[in-house]
Image (cartoon, rainbow, N blue to C red):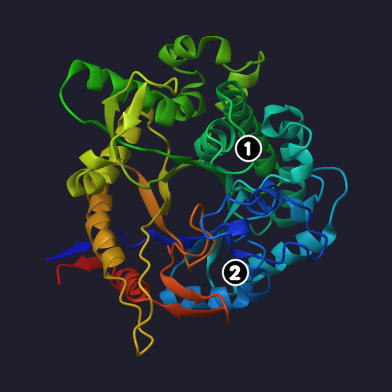
Amino acid sequence: MAIMFPDDFVWGTTTSAYQTEGAVREDGRGETIWDRFTHTPGKVRDGSTGDFACDSYHRYRDDIDLMRRLGVNAYRFSVAWSRIYPEGYGRLNRAGLDHYERVVDALLAANITPYLTLYHGDLPQAIQDRGGWANRDAISAFAEYADTLSRRLGDRIAHWVTHNEPGHVAYHGYITGENAPGLRSWKTGLQVAHNVLVSHGEAVPILRANGNTATEVGIAVGVTPCYPATDREADLAAVVRYDGFANRWYLDPLIRGKYPDDLMERFGADAPEIRAADMTTIATPIDFLGVNYATHAVIRDDLAPPIMAARVSRDDETDLAGVEGLSDTLTRVQREYAPASILITGNGAPDNTEPDVHGVIHDRARIEYLRAIFPQLLRALDAGVPLRGYFLWTLMDCFAFPGGYSTRFGIAYTDFATQTRTLKESGHWYARVIAEGEIRDA
């Protein structure tokens, strides 16, 4: 039995600037919060940084050749804001614009459609020094950046993603401090989440104005399906709380123009400052909603902090929930928010398998994960979800937080000493799925 995908399905892969480009001090690039964070001892498990990463800044043509071998028809990548404006705004670095123009032209020459992400977490450090996303000046700086980039590339880029996972930026960067810039404040984090969403809404009409009738603008949001650990009333209530902050806090304002009442009440004095036009700006209509899916969450009630009073219980996870979660997520988003179209803008799994004596990488755990995940895409399509495509995270092994280079998410193996890329078994498997448009049982 074979499971068929639509002929016009978008098959892609995705990367981010800081995790792959390297060349952090070349051609006028400014410092970012990730540069500062990773150079702080103890922040990365293996002590590494993204200073060199995959050297994609110089080897982007090799990466495009790799994509051609895979047969993908789309590539989602991010631009390093600090390559365009080293201080975040004001002084323009034309060498950065020239670089990304070359990347886009090379993609188009290879018949690979670029999906350009403006922001993937690498805020210019100069903006962070002035308060980062907690300072509303970052909103206008982002609008200037979006305008400059789209004026240069809007005639060739038809698909724009404003932000990658605002929730990840706010929660892990400003609340738990696990990611750059490493701050720990609920109040600051909630304001950051709000300001990032406002910046998204400000950028949407700018990107459209600098494009053409084919221009599409969206945002990539991480969505985590939540399941109760037990049928106890306390665990069921904890699921509502956790889902509220992880999912509804972002989806509701983007689609409905309003934060959830239950969360605004719970956050109280920590709730963000909201100006008169903010919610209308955030809810500026988008052409597609990007969904990033990593895993599900099994939730237990917890009386201890943080404020969500719920905890993810890894011991309670099941393979079934992890797989079924993607279908549940897509049908839930369509049922409750009805976006015009949906793209899976990021999904994948780690597998640290090393090459065997013949240089072959048998990353079978990743293949089994994908083999289980892909039927969920078909199930969502059959249920009427307007799912247009899938972007696999990630093209090649790269810098990954918190494991640095010790955690491998790529479908191509990166030898970081030589920067050689080698397709893994999962890469060959993905190429066959793309070529055949189906998943075979065997």
Q: Circle 1 sits on which residue? A: 204
Q: Secondary structure at mark 1?
A: helix
Mark sitting earlier along the chain (1/2): 2
Taking the image as shown, residue 287 lies to the left or right of residue 107, namely left
Q: Is residue 110 left or right of residue 331?
A: right
In the picture, measured across the screen, residue 119 lies left or right of residue 84, that is left
Residue at position x 38%, y 29% in the image: 337
Residue sitting at the far bottom: 358
Q: Position of residue 7 (x, y in %)?
A: 33, 63
Q: Amino acid at mark 2?
A: Leu
Q: Out of 376 and 387, give the one closest to the viewer.
A: 376
* Residue under numbered circle 2: 108
Up-down relation of residue 311 to residue 397 (above or below)? above
Locate the N terminus by quadrant. bottom left
Where's residue 124, x and y in %? Answer: 73, 46
Q: Residue furthest right?
A: 91
Residue type beneath disc 1: Val
**Residue in the picture at 64% in, 65% down:** 21
Q: Nearer the viewer, residue 410 or 382?
A: 410
Residue 304 visible, this orientation: yes
Instruction: Quadrant for the C terminus, please.
Output: bottom left
- Rounded to the nearest angstrom, the CA distance separating label 1 from label 2 is 23 Å
Please tell me how crowded label 2 is: few (under 14), some (14-19), or many (20+) other residues with Cα within 10 Å: some
Q: Residue 135's mark?
A: none
